[in-house]
Amino acid sequence: MSSLCRRGWGIKWSFEKTAFMLYPYDDTRTEMQMMTVFDLSSPVPDHAKGAVIIIGNFDAAHRGHQMLIGKARLFARAHNLKCAVLTFEPHPRRVFRPDDPPFRVTPLPVKLERLEASGVDHVYICPFNWELAALSAGDFIQTILQDQLAPAHIFIGADFHFGQHRSGNAATLRAAGIPTTTLDLQDDGHHSVISASRVRSAIQGGHMAEANELLGWDWFIEGTVEHGNKRGREIGFPTANVQLGETIHPSYGIYATMIQIGNETIWRPAATNIGIRPMFKVETGLVEAFIFDFQGDLYGQTVRVRPLHKIRDEMAFASLDDLILQMNKDCADIRKICA
């Protein structure tokens, strides 16, 4: 089993050993309808070629991405074809700017889940490295698209470019004989384009309602509960501690959140600190969730933390008593928000 097996999703390796299928354990769809994921470092089987392909990074899987996928799906169904996404891992920004702080709205497992929810049949994951970045647009078309995937049709956003120096575009694809449709970028209804950059800015500003509106789904942080220094437990607020990893860091502070544990379907209210804890100072941003009215051992379990509203910034207190007094006030406020 791959490390992607989590949250009630299973992974089934195909016979070709080049793909796995993500499917909910309670799914009633047939196997032919399961989303299949192919790593392009291995050959793609013939039966998975010839799809309608949407190309992009798809970090955030936001409303603009969903619109693009929706249009491509309609076209694919009308022509009795599969609908597929070609995406890149790691995100090219991580290769070009390796020292950037974490910026992923949707790490790979979450991105795959959101793509599956959009109705995609196949996902092709193209390993991104300096060798791929050095390919000319023509070489990318030949070696990746035509030789490996044989697309029946390609859909891209109007701003999409590819190949070394971003020299390739829709005209390049059409000149190579690949039917290509470009779609204008989705706006938010107020004449502003929806983009992953806007989603990141909203999250980094602590504006969760704005981020969720741009996404079209409720953003969450997913991770494994780790052992901490037990300071929360010592003062009466035991927390589930989760590293942010490559996930973008929200504005540091105290949040009203909802928590989903393991394969549970319910979401539990929690007061959550996201940050470096000025009173005790951790080296990097950490998620610490105090789940209301919960008792149990969560160590090693996967949880999802869904920030609803930031109620205040992090701060240092003169004493532990002052900290506890403020935490009790925070919890009372958060219970009202989550009610």
Image (cartoon, rainbow, N blue to C red):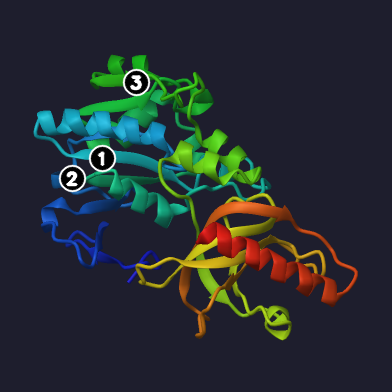
**Circle 1 residue:** 84
**Circle 2 residue:** 48
Q: Looking at this view, name the residue that lies furthest to the right.
A: 318
Instruction: Measuring from the top left, give residue 151's x and y in whole percent.
Output: 22, 32
For marks 3 and 2, the one nearer the N-term is 2
- Mark 3 and mark 1: Cα distance apart in space: 16 Å
Q: In which quarter of the image is residue 231?
A: bottom right
Q: Is residue 236 above or below residue 159?
A: below
Q: Residues within 10 Å of mark 3 (few under 14, many from 20)?
A: some
For marks 3 and 1, the one nearer the N-term is 1
Residue 183 — which label?
Answer: 3
Depth order, front residue of 160/210: 210
Q: Which residue is drawn at 90% across and 69% down?
A: 318
Depth order, front residue of 302/252: 252
Residue 241 — which label?
Answer: none
Q: Which residue is drawn at 80% across and 67% down?
A: 281
Residue type of the residue flagged with mark 3: Leu
Question: Circle 2 — which element?
Answer: helix
